[in-house]
Amino acid sequence: MSVFGDGLEAAVHKVFTRPAPKSAGAQMRYLVKQLKGTKAVAQMLRISQRTVERYVKDQLKKPRPDLAARLEAEVKKRWQPQVRAKAREKAATTGGIVIDTRARIGYTAPIGTTDEDRLRHLTVALPPQYAGRLFDAQEQGATDQQLQQIAAEALKEVYFQDSGRRAGSLEEVRFTDIEHLEFEL
């Protein structure tokens, strides 16, 4: 499970102007239209072309749980690409992104400071450059660990160092044991 990747996707899904198709038939018809044919959809979902055709004609209505999950994921991945692109663009240029997390957060600092990892609940507005870095990294297939590192750098600068006004000698922020993570555009 990709905590950061899923969190970023969920934030983008909140800006959709229309709900994605819900029924299996409607989802299948949408994918057939997007991929221009039943064969491509069948290969992507790892089912037979005939099964895709049955869903399109509403002859089949209730997919197996694993197929239903794959179907929904593929539809959401392609749903409203212009709206998705605008939301990411706005977050990366003007709006920024808000991170709400409950996790174990600590830092590396000079000897004599209280750098213990402890459970913290933070809600922090990150500037647009970090939103842009997160979305760019996600699009380039970054791992959850890499996305977590970008978020940790952002928290270091914005929360701990207050954009350069304090804790100038802070070296590294550790961001582990994530209990809750949510992004808001």
Image (tube, rainbow, N blue to C red):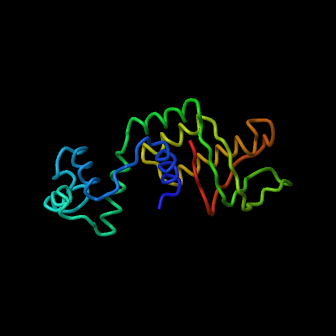
Q: Quadrant of residue 33?
A: top left
Query: Hey, which residue is sitting farthest bottom in the picture?
Result: 64
From the viewer's perspective, tell me whether residue 172 is left or right of residue 135: right
Badge count: 0
124, 142: nearer the viewer = 124
Residue 176 is situated, as x and y percent measured from the top left of the image, at: 63, 60
116, 18: nearer the viewer = 18
Quarter of the image with the C terminus in it = top right
Residue located at (64% from left, 49% from top): 152
Residue 72 is situated, as x and y percent measured from the top left of the image, at: 35, 56
Q: Quadrant of residue 168?
A: top right
From the viewer's perspective, tell me whether residue 10 is left or right of residue 152: left
Query: Hey, which residue is sitting farthest right in the picture?
Result: 112
Residue located at (66% from left, 41% from top): 125
Residue 82 is situated, as x and y percent measured from the top left of the image, at: 39, 35
Query: Hey, which residue is sitting farthest top in the picture?
Result: 93
Residue 15 is situated, as x and y percent measured from the top left of the image, at: 49, 42
106, 99: nearer the viewer = 99
